[in-house]
Amino acid sequence: MGKTIVCPCHDVTVEDIRATHAAGYTHPETLKRATAAFMGPCQGKHCAGAVMALLRELTGGRDAPVTRRPTARPPLRPVALGLLAAAAEAEAAEAAASGTGGDVRTGGA
């Protein structure tokens, strides 16, 4: 049987959620930190329904915190994507100039 993905941004599967829940991560906030569900580019828009339904199923509907999805944390202030890209390029250039390794965006590969 194939894997059922509940968070397409981070490839989190039903099995991942079940195992993480069994390990004690029963609150949506702790589950988010353990699996990265809700933290992809969509910020949970694609996976929140499925992950929360699975959590309710796993807790038997007993836990009130499971009724709310984790808090979204937008940037402190708006940041232009061009500034972020320029910072990444500057880091890559600095790493290449210092001879410490390749491209920081790919983990130095």
Image: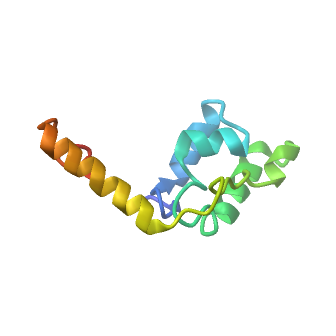
Is any part of residue 2 visible from this angle? no
| Colouring convention used in this rendered image of the protein | rainbow
Q: Residue at x 72, y 51 (%)?
A: 70
Q: Position of residue 40 (x, y in %)?
A: 52, 59
Q: Which x, y percent locates residue 59?
A: 77, 43
Please report the residue visible at 26 percent of the width from the left and 44 percent of the height from the top.
107
> Toward which corner of the image does residue 30 lie, by quadrant?
top right
Total marks placed: 0
Residue 14 on image: x %, y %:
55, 53
Q: Is residue 96 above or below residue 9?
A: above
For image coordinates 64% across by 68% down, the residue present is: 45
Of 40 and 22, the residue lying toward us: 40
Q: Is residue 46 left or right of residue 99?
A: right
Q: Can you tell which quarter of the image residue 25 is in?
A: top right
* Residue 84 percent location from the top left of the image: 42, 59
Q: Is residue 49 visible?
A: yes
Q: Is 52 displayed left or right of 11 in the figure? A: right
Residue 78 relative to residue 91: left or right: right
> Which of the 4 image quarters holds residue 31?
top right
Q: Please, is residue 80 above or below residue 40 in the view?
A: below
Q: Quadrant of the N terminus?
A: bottom left
Q: Is residue 59 above or below residue 42?
A: above
| Residue at the extreme top | 24
